[in-house]
Amino acid sequence: MAGPHFVNIDRDTPLLLPVDLREWIEEDDLARFVLEAVAAVDVSTAVINTRGCGSAQYPPCMMLAVLLYCYATGIFSSRQIERLTHQHLSVRYLAGNEHPDHDTICKFRRENGALIKATLGEVVRLAGRLGLGRVGTICLDGTKLVADASTRRTFNDEELRAEEARLDLQIDELLAQAAAADAQPEPEAARLPAALRSRERLREQVRQAREALAAEVKERAQARAAERAEWKKDPIGECPRALAEQPQASDRINLTDPDGTWIARQGQPPVFGYNAQLAVSAEAHAIIVAAEVCTQPNDRQQLRPMMEKLPLAVRAPLERVVVDTGYDHCGQILAVETTLGLEVICPPQKSAAEKAIETATPPAPPAPPEPAAKAQPKKKPQSYRQAGQRVRARMKEQSESEEGRAWLKVRRTTVEPVFGLIKSVLGFRRFHLRGLAKVNLEWQLVATAFNCRRLSRLFTPEELRAA
C-alpha cells in the first residue's frame, strides 16, 4: 500500500521566471483599491528633494499608498511599516518590492500634511463619482484621543518656576564639579560636560515652556475678550466668561507635547490629548467628509469651524447638520444657519434656571400671612436674553419634533459607530505624532484610510477604474 503523497517543498532552488507581484494578492484586496485611489491624487504638493542630489527618492504616490494601507489595517508605527515591507505581501506589492526605512516613512508622513489633506478630499470626490455623492445631511461629533506625551511632564507656571530653580542649582553644582575635575583623569572629566549640557538643554526647554504657557494664556484671554466684544454687538445666549491674562494654577503645559491639553471625560478620568472632530455623511454609507483636531476640551465652539472646513462639493447640496447637545452654542448655531443656510438640529442643554427647578427642594408649607407693609418682593429668576431664548426655543422644538428625533437617531447610527470602528477595529486610540499641526494631518490620514477601507468593501477595482 502506497504511503501519503506530499507536495514537494523546495526552498533552495531559485525561481526560474521573474516574479509577478500582482499574482500574490487577491483581486478584491484593499491594496488594489488603494492604488486606484492614489492614482487620482495630485502629488504635486508632496515635499520632495527638488535639487535631485543624493540617492534616488521614493515616489510620493508609493509612499502615500503604503501609509494608507497600513493605517487602514491598524498599523501606525513607522518601524512596523518598515518591517511589513519585507513580511506582508500586500505592503510589499504597494511598495514595489522596495523597503523604505522607518526614518523615511516618518519624515514623509510628518512633512506632507497638504498632500494627505488633498487625498481625503479626492477620496470624498471619488465616493461621489461612485454614486455616493448625494450628501444632504452631515452628522458631527468629537472624541478625545490621547497625545503621544508623558503626563508626568505636565506643569503649571509655579511648578515650571520651581523646576527651573532646581535645574539652576544642579547646573551650578556641575560647574563647580567641572572646575574641580580639571585635575582628574580624562574619563571623569569627559562625563561632566555631557551631564552639564543635558541639564542646560532641559533648563532651556523649561524656560521655553514657561514662555509658551504665558503666551498661550494671554492669547486665549485676548480671544475671549474679542468674543465678549462681539457678543455685546449681538447679545445672543450667555455672555462668554472673561479669562485672566496671567497663568493660573489650572493652566498647565506639557514639555513633550506643548500643544496638548487636559480633557475631561464623562464618567472617566481626564486624559492629556486632543479633541478630534469628524463630519460624517448621513446618506453615503457614513463616509467621512471632514476631519479636524482642536485643543478645546469640549465641542461647544466647533460647529461653525467644522462646517467651514467642508469641501465645496459637499457644502453645496448640504441641507442640514445634526449634532448632539455638546454643540449647544446659540451664536455658533445662528451663524451656521444665517451664513451657510443650513438647518441645525441640536438638542439644547438645560438652562441654569431649568436645572435649578429640577434640583430644587420641595417647597416649605406656606407661612402665615404678614402685613402688606412687611411683604418682600419676589426675585425674578435669571434667564437668557430674548434672542437667545428664541434660538433655544426653536432648537428644542426642532429636536423634539418627529423629524428631529429621526435625524438624531440617524446621528447615533452613523458618526458614533465610525468612532467605534476607528478605535476598536483599526485600534487607533492615541496619536503617534506631536504638535497640533502634525496631529491634525495624522487624524486626516486616519479618516482617509477609513474611507478607503469602507469603499473597498462596497466597490470592486473595476468599478473604481470605471468611475
Image (spheres, rainbow, N blue to C red):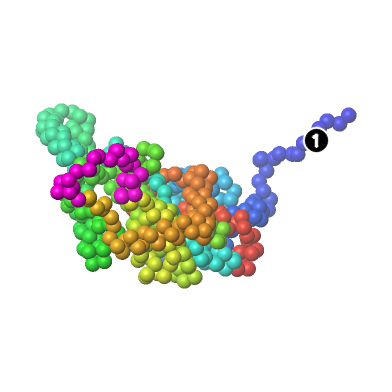
Q: Amino acid at mark 1?
A: His
Decide: is 72 above or below 11. Answer: below
Give the camera-side residue of 225 and 119: 225
Q: Which residue is mark 1?
A: 5
Q: Secondary structure at mark 1?
A: loop
Question: Where does the magenta region start and end?
Answer: 352-377
* Residue drawn at (37%, 52%) of the image: 349
- Residue at the far right: name it: 1
Decide: is 27 above or below 206. Answer: below
- Side of 294 where 7 appears, left or right: right
Neighbourhood count class around disc 1 (C-alpha, 10 Å): few under 14, some 14–19, many 20 upward: few
**Quarter holding the C terminus?**
bottom right
Whether residue 279 is visible: no
* Residue drawn at (22%, 50%) of the image: 378
The picture places residue 85, in percent across and down from the top left corner, at 53, 48
- Side of 186 where 176 appears, left or right: left
Magenta stretch encompasses residue 362: yes
* Residue drawn at (63%, 60%) of the image: 459
Magenta stretch encompasses residue 161: no
Give the camera-side residue of 144 and 351: 351
**Quarter holding the N terminus?**
top right
The picture places residue 353, in percent across and down from the top left corner, at 31, 50
Decide: is 438 above or below 230. Answer: above
